Image (cartoon, rainbow, N blue to C red):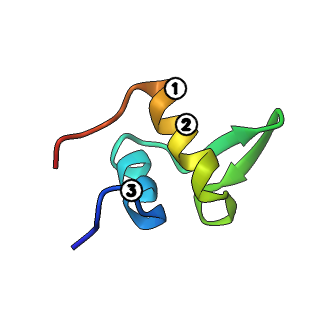
Amino acid sequence: MNLTGTKSWAKKVLKENGYNQIMINKRPVRLANAKAQALYSEIIRLNLQSTH
């Protein structure tokens, strides 16, 4: 079970939507190497919040 608001949840939401990398400071960063706050920011920016 992935709890909403955890790093693993954020990675799962992005992967389900086809993202393997996000851009941080104009550079691509793998989801595993990104900080949780950066993942949450990307989810909010892309408006991917899910209701699971």
Mark 3 to mark 2: distance in Å? 13 Å
| Tag of residue 45 | 1
- Residue depth check, mark 1 versus mark 3: number of the one nearer the observer: 3
Indicate whether 42 appears above or below 15: above
Image check: 12 left or right of 43?
A: left
Q: What is the quadrant of residue 1 in the picture? A: bottom left
Looking at the rendered structure, the kind of residue marked 1 is Arg
Spot occupied by residue 2 in the image (x, y as percentages of width and height): 28, 68
Image check: 49 left or right of 40?
A: left
Image check: 16 left or right of 38?
A: left
**Secondary structure state at the residue bearing disc 3:** loop
**Mark 2 nearby-residue class (10 Å; few <14, some 14–19, many ≥20):** some
Mark earlier in primary sequence (1, 3): 3
Toward the viewer: 16 or 4?
Answer: 4
**Secondary structure state at the residue bearing disc 1:** helix
Q: Are marks 1 and 2 in contact (CB under 8 Å)?
A: yes
Q: Residue at x 63, y 46 (%)?
A: 38
| Tag of residue 42 | 2
Residue carrying label 3: 5
